[in-house]
C-alpha cells in the first residue's frame, strides 16, 4: 500500500517538472547495492583506510571525494577517477573533524572543517600545514556550509543553534534556533547537525537531529519551515530518526537526508509528507552481514 502511494506521488510530481534542465531526476531509481568508493571496510589509518568517517564533500570539477576521517584526525581526498589509488591527506592533526565543505571558487580548493572536540571551525588553504580558525568558539561543532559571500554557517549542537560568521566583519550572529534552548516549536532547533545552503534561494537547510526533521530557514527568518520528517521520531515513511546530514538538489529542491538512526538515505520531494528510501534501510545488523558476505565473495 505504501509503495503505491509513493509511486503515485512520484509520478504526479514528475509530470509537473521539465526534465531537460535536471541532472538528477526526482524519479531516479537507485541500485539497492552500494559500491565502496572510499575506505576498505576495515578500521585503520593506512592511506586507503578510514576510521569513523563523519562527513563527505564531492568536488564535481575534479571528481574528488573529500572525507572527514574523524577517528584519524585528518581529511582525506580520494580520486573517484582512479578508485584503487590511495588517498591524499589534505588536513591533519584536527581534533575530531566532523563535517567539511570544499570551496572551489579560485580553482584552488579551500577546505572548511568543523572541529567537533576542538570546538571551532578551521579553514585550510591548498597545501597548508595548519588551519586558520574562523571566528570564536563553535561548541560541539557539527554542520558547516558556505554561501556565495564566503559567510560560514556552523551548527553548535549542544547550544541548539546555527551561527553565521562573516569574513568581512569577523562577527558571528545567530541565524537559526534559540541560544542554549532546544524545543520543538518552529523557532527552535534541537541538536542541529548537518547544514546545506541553497545558493539559488538563499535558504539554509538544517538537519534538526533532536527533532527528527529537516528545517528550512529563509534569509533573515525568525523561524524554520519543515521540509521533511516531523511525524515524531520513527522509521515509517513519514518519519526520520536523528538525521545528521542534508543535501538539496538546487534545481528540483528535492531534499536528500542521511537518516542516521534508521541507517538509510531518504529522499523527500517538495511538499511531500513522506519520503522514499534511496539507500540502506535494511537495519544495521542485516546491512553489516550483507556487506560481509559481499566482501567474502571478492
Ligand atoms: C576574530 O574574532 C575572534 C573572536 O571572535 C578573535 O579571537 C580573533 O582574534 C578575531 N580576528 C581578527 C583578525 O580580528
Ligand atoms: C506517522 O506516525 C504514526 C505513528 O508512528 C504512523 O502510524 C503513521 O503511519 C505515520 N505517518 C506517515 C505518513 O508515515
Image (cartoon, rainbow, N blue to C red):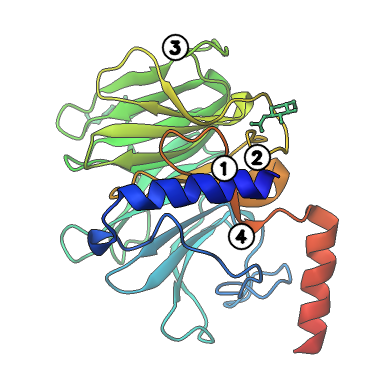
Residue at image x 43%, y 33%? 271
In whole angstroms, how far apart are the C-alphas of marks 4 and 2? 35 Å
Res. 266 visible in picture: no
Asked whether 235 or 61 is in front, the reply is 235
Mark 4 Cα within 10 Å, few/some/many (few <14, many 20+)? many
Q: Which residue is disc 3 drawn over?
A: 187
SS class, disc 2: loop
In whole angstroms, how far apart are the C-alphas of marks 1 and 2? 6 Å
In whole angstroms, how far apart are the C-alphas of marks 4 and 1? 34 Å
Labels 3 and 2 touching (C-beta < 8 A) = no
Count of numbered circles on the image: 4
Res. 59 visible in picture: yes
Residue at image x 71%, y 71%? 41
SS class, disc 1: loop
| Of callouts 3 and 2, the N-terminal one | 3
Residue at image x 71%, y 53%? 281
Mark 1 Cα within 10 Å, few/some/many (few <14, many 20+)? many
Amino acid at each position: 500500500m505504501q509503495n503505491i502511494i509513493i509511486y503515485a506521488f512520484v509520478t504526479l510530481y514528475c509530470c509537473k517538472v521539465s526534465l531537460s534542465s535536471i541532472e538528477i531526476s526526482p524519479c531516479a531509481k537507485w541500485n539497492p547495492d552500494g559500491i565502496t568508493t572510499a575506505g576498505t571496510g576495515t578500521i585503520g589509518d593506512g592511506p586507503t583506510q578510514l576510521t569513523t568517517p563523519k562527513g563527505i564533500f564531492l568536488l564535481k570539477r575534479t571528481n574528488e571525494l573529500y572525507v572527514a576521517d574523524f577517528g584519524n584526525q585528518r581529511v582525506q581526498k580520494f580520486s573517484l577517477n582512479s578508485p584503487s589509488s590511495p588517498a591524499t591527506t589534505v588536513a591533519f592533526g584536527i581534533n575530531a573533524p566532523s563535517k567539511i565543505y570544499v570551496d572551489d571558487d579560485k580553482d584552488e580548493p579551500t577546505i572548511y572543517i568543523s572541529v567537533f572536540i576542538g570546538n571551532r571551525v578551521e579553514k585550510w588553504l591548498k597545501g597548508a600545514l595548519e588551519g586558520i580558525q574562523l571566528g570564536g568558539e563553535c561548541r560541539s561543532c557539527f554542520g558547516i556550509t558556505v554561501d556565495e559571500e564566503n559567510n560560514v554557517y556552523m551548527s553548535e549542537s549542544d547550544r541548539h543553534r546555527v551561527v553565521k560568521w562573516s569574513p568581512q566583519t569577523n562577527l558571528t550572529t545567530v541565524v537559526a534556533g534559540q541560544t542554549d534552548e532546544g524545543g520543538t516549536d518552529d523557532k527552535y532547533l534541537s541538536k542541529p547537525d548537518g547544514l546545506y545552503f541553497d545558493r539559488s534561494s538563499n535558504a539554509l537547510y538544517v538537519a534538526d537531529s533532536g527533532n527528527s526533521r529537516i528545517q528550512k530557514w529563509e534569509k533573515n527568518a525568525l523561524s524554520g519551515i519543515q521540509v521533511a520528517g516531523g511525524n515524531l521520531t520513527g522509521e515509517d515513511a513519514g518519519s526520520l530518526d536523528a538525521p545528521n546530514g542534508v543535501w538539496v538538489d538546487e534545481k528540483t529542491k528535492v531534499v536528500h537526508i542521511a537518516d542516521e538512526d534508521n541507517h538509510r538515505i531518504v529522499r523527500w520531494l517538495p511538499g511531500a509528507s513522506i519520503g522514499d528510501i534511496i539507500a540502506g534501510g535494511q537495519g544495521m545488523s542485516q546491512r553489516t552481514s550483507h556487506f560481509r558476505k559481499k566482501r567474502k565473495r571478492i
